[in-house]
Image (spheres, rainbow, N blue to C red):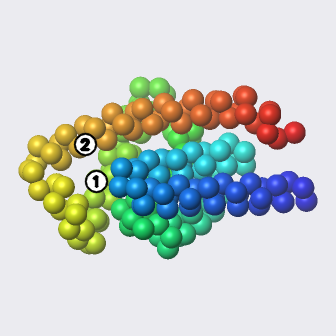
Amino acid sequence: MRHNSFRTALGGILSALSITFMFLGGVFPFAEYVGPALASICVLIFKEEFGAKPTVIMYVAVSLLALLVSPSIESSLIFIAFFGWYPIIKNLIETKIKKPLSLIVKLAVVNVSILSLYYVLLNVLKLPSLEEDLAGGPWIITVLIVLYNITFLLFDRLLTIIAYYYRNILRKKLIR
């Protein structure tokens, strides 16, 4: 019984913190990507504690609430399209696929999800602000893709460090 109540309480706290990050990511224009990234750290911590299956429920709950609460639809969709579910599958990719190939798979995953997201944002939702940002031509899109990949590699490394820190240092201090 204690385990279930602890899971529920921690899930509620981390979900609320994720929604707060998502809300702040929509309020501050410079934080449109930072909010979903910080929310994904909450997903990672929950996954480290309870595994992938319960974390999927948390991801779905945060995704739905982010769509309702966040002032930025783009920020919410960035979380839904990538930042929310990537911490759940990250360890699976790293353990099931050998090192050089896992990097290629991770880059393919991020590129497919980001390109799909921007296809939806531009062609389905038709966000005028995004169309203005990308109006500079194909070279801007190429530069953005390169920057997304570099940022993703840094983010992936950061998630690895945070997972290690949580598992080996912070968890021992917080959960007794």
Label 2 sits on what residue type? Ile
Q: Relative to 29, is 48 above or below?
A: above
Give SS at disc 1. helix
Structural distance between the alpha carbons of marks 1 and 2: 9 Å
Quadrant in the rendering for residue 121: bottom left
| Viewport quadrant of the C terminus | top right
| Residue found at the far right of this picture | 1
Quick check: marks 1 and 2 in contact, CB under 8 Å?
A: yes
- The answer to whether residue 123 is visible is no
Amino acid found under the numbered disc labelled 1 = Leu
Residue tagged 1? 115
- Position of 104 with respect to 174 (left or right) is left
Q: Which residue lies furthest to the left in this view?
A: 137
Q: Residues within 10 Å of mark 1 (few under 14, many from 20)?
A: few
Give 136 or 52, whichever is nearer the viewer. Answer: 136
Q: Is residue 156 visible?
A: yes
Q: Mark 2 points at which residue?
A: 145
Left or right, 75 with reference to 142: right
Q: Which residue is drawn at 40% across and 33% down?
A: 153
Q: Which residue lies furthest to the top in this view?
A: 100
Q: What element carries label 2?
A: helix
- Figure quadrant of the N terminus: bottom right
- The x, y position of residue 111, in whole percent, is 32, 46
Left or right: residue 115 compared with residue 152: left
Q: Position of residue 73 (x, y in %)?
A: 38, 67
Which of the two labelled residues, at mark 1 and mark 2, occupies the earlier sequence position? 1
